[in-house]
Amino acid sequence: MPALAAAFYPTQGRGTGVAWMLGVGRFGGVAGSFLVAELARRHFTFAGIFATVAIAALLLKQVAQPRAAESGATASESFGH
């Protein structure tokens, strides 16, 4: 993942961007485990847990998507081509 993520950051901020990506990913792994454990404790079905986690992921993606578009960089600029 770090090699793939490096293509999305400009050269000047690549190290910081990849480090943040790894940190957020680890936080998400821990938070996701707690969320699934809490939902299981509340007797959610497997389908209910999956739906809850999927909806949460989609909402987070929608919140993050406009911020990426506001940066003004095009896809070709972010890949360095």
Image: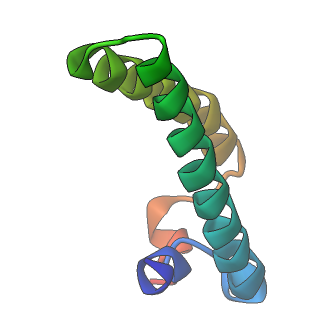
Position of 28 relative to 18 (above/below): above
Describe residue 31's horizontal placement relative to residue 74 as left or right: right
Q: Nearer the viewer, residue 72 or 51?
A: 51
Residue at screen point 50% across, 24% down: 56
Q: Position of residue 33 (x, y in %)?
A: 52, 43
Describe residue 73's horizontal placement relative to residue 7 as left or right: right
- Extreme residue in the left direction: 47
Residue at screen point 50% across, 74% down: 5
Residue at screen point 67% across, 55% down: 27
Q: Position of residue 59 (x, y in %)?
A: 52, 23
Q: Nearer the viewer, residue 40 or 47?
A: 40
Q: Nearer the viewer, residue 65 or 79?
A: 65
Describe residue 46's horizontal placement relative to residue 34 as left or right: left
Residue at screen point 55% across, 31% down: 35
The quadrant of the picture occupied by the C terminus is: bottom left
Q: Position of residue 36 (x, y in %)?
A: 46, 32
Q: Position of residue 29 (x, y in %)?
A: 54, 54
Describe residue 58's horizontal placement relative to residue 48 as left or right: right
Count of numbered marks = 0
